Amino acid sequence: MRARSHKTNIIDIVTLGCSKNTVDSEVLLTQLQANQFEATHQSGNPDANIIVVNTCGFIDNAKQESIDTILHYIDEKEAGNIEKLFVTGCLSHRYKDELKAEMPEVDDFFGTMELPALLDRLGADYKRNLLGERITTTPFHYAYLKISEGCNRPCSFCAIPLMRGNHVSKPIEQLVREAEHLAAKGVRELMLIAQDTTYYGLDIYNDRKLAELMTQLGDVKGIDWVRLHYAYPSKFPMDVLPVIKNHPSVCSYLDMPLQHSSDHMLKKMRRGITKRRTQELIDQIRVEVPNIALRTTMLVGHPGETQEDFEDLCNFVRENRFERLGVFTYSHEDGTHAYTLTDDVPDELKEERAAELMAIQEEISLELNQKKIGKQMKVLIDRMEGEHFIARSEFDSPEVDNEVIIQDHDNYLRIGDFIQVEITDATEFDLHAKRIDGK
């Protein structure tokens, strides 16, 4: 057992899951440091004696990762390497009673809406005057901006409303203030996130206000890129499109998870939209914003998905040639509407369908990328790896989309800077480029 000599608590926050969890951990970190705690995020600090695990509970794999992480820190506690262990986030919110019974070694569990209670348990005060201020854990030049919490959609497969509650929008002035604080710290790109960004404003303004929000955020001095994620296709607010097209700080990028194309599956998934309406929406988006990069995600293996449904989806992807696409396999989540259905697609078949759909997308992505060879574009430098600088265009979001690889031996490129490049080569998911300005 390791002897401890420090007199004050050192807290390390461990985050699992999506970007929304990242923001929650950043808010917790900000509150702790404002309370004069020595707190870090995923630092692996060997002197940390308190661990807070922010869990994900969305699908089976994520839940298992969360459980494995908690068990790891239980072992660390029993070995004397840490003194206290707290668990928060989606898994804790959804299964608190079960986790308490199975893991009595954890000092306490908290749900997604229990930040003040968690802070109190840690001996800290919840400081409401910090609203809008946040310590970021992402690279300094970009940040996620969570514009709302929860979701009102009835999607059959999704457990988010069980963990996050109904949709609650943040006021525009609060989000603008947060963006101003982030810009003052050097953030140049904002990724707008929520469970459903297109519902924004309905609950507090009785109207969809996403276009107005994007405009005001794009006007914040120092913010060069505003990027929209997680747009729901049903009742998509079309007034967003002119903002994407015309505002100089809004990226020609839209992340809109469609999940499926077959009317049979869209109905089973309770998506509130038909294949015809989905296609009309895609077509209209591309007419109004001709250079837009459309990112989507698809779900395969939902109860009742037939081979015919899957082939419909494959053809839909081939025809629409999405610039970016991800695929998930269905996870049978208790408490969801789909859990009342028979999980009748074998796991092996789910994986086969996901692989087949991604193979189709790889071909599309390679063709689209190769058309960029010889073209010039502005990119944002994210990091350096070996002799290469890794950047992104406005058509790519961090971690999930294409990267631009720049080899520049003669000039040091600063992280967080925008530069002009020419594309020299392309693979399925990466572009290679050379710098053409600043010589």
Image: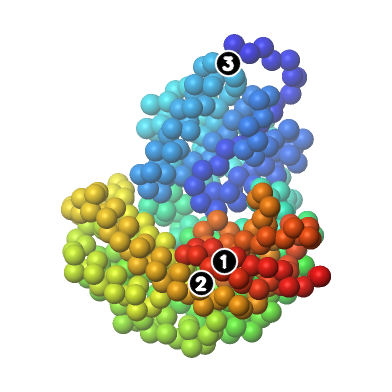
Judging depth in this view, the residue of 122 and 136 nearest the camera is 136
Visible in this render: residue 131? no
Q: Mark 1 and mark 2: span between their CA atoms?
A: 7 Å
Percent across and percent down for residue 222 are: 77, 67
Q: Which residue in the structure is indicated by mark 1?
A: 431
Looking at numbered disc 2 in the image, what kind of residue is underneath it?
Answer: Asn
On the picture, is 247 further left or further right than 309? right
Give the residue drawn at x 65%, y 50%: 385
Marker disc for residue 369: 2
Q: How crowded is mark 1: few (under 14 residues within 10 Å), some or many (20 or more)?
A: many
Looking at the image, is mark 2 or mark 3 earlier in the sequence?
A: 3
Residue at numbered disc 3? 80
Element type where label 2 sits in the image:
helix
Q: Can residue 39 be seen in this view?
A: yes
Q: In which quarter of the image is the C terminus?
A: bottom right
Q: How far apart are marks 3 and 1 (CA)?
A: 48 Å
Q: Quadrant of the N terminus?
A: top right
Q: Is mark 1 on a helix, strand or loop?
A: strand
Residue 8 sits in quarter = top right
In percent of width and height, residue 131 lies at 70, 54
Residue in view at x 27 percent, y 59 percent: 353
- Do the CB atoms of the residues marked 3 and 1 lie less than 8 Å apart? no
Q: Position of residue 402 (x, y in %)?
A: 54, 63
The residue closer to the viewer here, 153 or 426, is 426
